[in-house]
Image (spheres, rainbow, N blue to C red):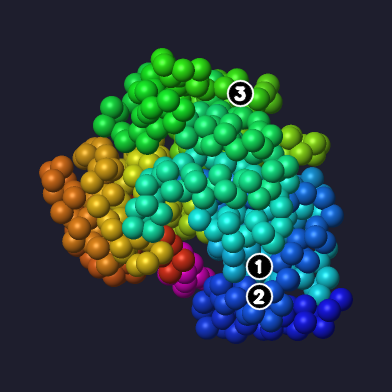
Amino acid sequence: MKIRRLFAIWASKLTGFVCKLLGKQGLTWSGKIALAIDPDILTEMAADVREKIFVVCGTNGKTTINNLLCSTLEGQGKKVICNHSGSNMLNGAIAAFVLSAKWNGKIDADYACIEVDEASTLRIFPHFKPDYMILNNLFRDQLDRYGEIDITMNLLKDAMRIAPEMTIIVNGDDALSTYLAQESGNPYVTYGIQEQVFEEQSINEIKEGRFCKKCGAKLFYNFYHYSQLGDYHCPNCDFHRPELNYNASNVKTGKVLDFDANGEHIHVNYRGFYNVYNILAVYAAVKEAGIPLQNFNEILGKYNPENGRMEHFSIKGTEIILNLAKNPAGFNQNISAVMEDDSPKDLIILINDNDQDGIDVSWLWDVDFDRLGDPSIRSITVSGIRCQDMRLRLKYVDIPSILEPDIETAVRKRIADGTRNLYVLVNYTALYSTHNILKRMEGEQS
C-alpha cells in the first residue's frame, strides 16, 4: 500500500475527530484533505470493495433509500460502506471510504452504498464505475443552483455514458426518470405502483413531466400519485409508463404503510406515501443484485432514521417529528404525511436561504400550503432566515402564523404550551443544526 494513501487516511481520520470535538460533521473537510494528499484514493479504495457498488440519485429520497439499502444489506450479513449523513458530493463520497478504513489503510467491505448529488455524478464517476444506480425521481430543486430539470437530466445522461455497464434501477412512475434511463443506453429495470391508490389528487400540484420528452406532446395520465408520478402515456408517440419489474400493490397508508411488493407483504410503522417508493427502490436493488432477502419487515422495523428524515424525539412529554422539506414536491408530500395524523398538532416551518439551500425561495409559492388550514393544526410557527417570506406565503392563504426566527426558542415555546404533538419541517442547512438542538434537549431530561 502506498505511503501516500496511508497518510491520507490518517490525516482524514484526524480531521474528522477534531471536527466532532468542535461539534461539526467535518465530512467535507475529511474528504477534501484525503483527496489533496492522494488524488487516486477514491479509485483505489472503491476497487477494494469485494462485490458491488450502488449509487443513489434523484431529487427526493436519496438519503432514506441509501440508508435503508445499507441496513438491508447489513441485515443479510454483509459489510457495507455508506455515506449515512447525506454528504453526497465528491468529498463526501471520499470521506465515506476513508473514514471506514482501518488504521492500516485497508477496508473490509462487501458492498458500498453511496448517495450522489446529481450534479456531482460527473466528478465522482471518473473515480469508479458503479454497478447499479437507483434513480428515484426528478423534480425542480434549487433553481439558482441546478437550473431547470433539463440541465440535471443532461448531467445524469453524461454520467451514465461514463459507466455504460451500470444497471439503472429507475422509478417507472416518473416519466422524466424513465425517459432518461431509456435514452441512456444502459441496462435498466423499473419499479413503481401499478394501481391507483388515491381517488383524486389536487390538480394544483406542479407536474414537472407535463410534456413528452420524446416528441413534445402533452402527456395523458390514467391516474397519478403525486407531482408527475403515475400512469402516463403519450398520445402522439410510443412513450408510456413501462411494464414494472418491481410493483407495489394493495397499498394502504396512514400511521403505517402496508403493501405487497411482487407478492411479498410489507408492513412498517412509517408515515408518508412517498416511503412506498423508497422501500420499493431498496427491495428492487437487493433483488436485482441477486442478494437473498430475509427478514425484510424486521429490518425495516428496526431502521431508525437519525438524520432528520421522519426522525422522532420525545422531550418533556412532547412527541416531535423532524423532517426535511426542500422543494415543492417534497414539501407537498410532507404536508400529506402531517395531515395523515388527524390528532391535534403544532407545526414549525424553518426556511433558510444559504448557498446549499438555494438563495431563491420563490419555490414556496408552488407548495399547497392552503392544506394547512385544517383545524387539527393548532399553531404554525415560522422560523429561520427567511421566516418573513414563509409568514407572507401563509398569509396569502389566510393562515395565521407565529414569528420566531430562532428554532430552539420556537421548539421550547411549543413544548411549554403546545399540543404535545409537534412536527418540525426544515430545509437543507437547518437540518443538522436542528437535529443537534433536539438531541441536546432530549438529553437534558436524563
* 424 versus 268 height, above or below: below
Which element is circle 1 on?
helix
- Closer-to-camera residue (256/359): 359
Magenta stretch: give its range: 434-446
Label whose residue precedes the other's in the sequence (2 or 3): 2
- Of badges 2 and 1, nearer the viewer stands 2
**Residue at image point 56% right, 81% down:** 19
- Return the x and y of residue 152 as percentages of the image width and height: 46, 48
- Return the x and y of residue 314 as percentages of the image width and height: 46, 58
Disc marking residue 94: 1
**Residue at image point 73% right, 35% down:** 288
Residue 273 visible somewhere in the drawing:
yes
Tag 1 and tag 3, C-beta contact below 8 Å: no
Disc marking residue 173: none
Decide if residue 8 is on the left or right side of residue 18.
Answer: right
* 414 versus 345 height, above or below: below
According to the picture, the residue beneath numbered tag 2 turns out to be: 35
Tag 2 and tag 1, C-beta contact below 8 Å: yes
Q: How many residues crowd mark 1 within 10 Å: few (<14), some (14–19), many (20+)?
A: many
**Residue at image point 83% right, 79% down:** 2
Which element is circle 3 on?
loop
Decide if residue 346 is on the left or right side of residue 224.
Answer: left
Under mark 2, the amino acid is Leu
Q: How far separated are the C-alphas under marks 2 and 1?
A: 8 Å
Q: How many residues crowd mark 3 within 10 Å: few (<14), some (14–19), many (20+)?
A: some
- Closer-to-camera residue (204/24): 204
- Closer-to-camera residue (260/39): 39
According to the picture, the residue beneath numbered tag 3 turns out to be: 244
* 228 versus 282 height, above or below: above
Under mark 1, the amino acid is Ile
Q: How far separated are the C-alphas under marks 2 and 3?
A: 40 Å
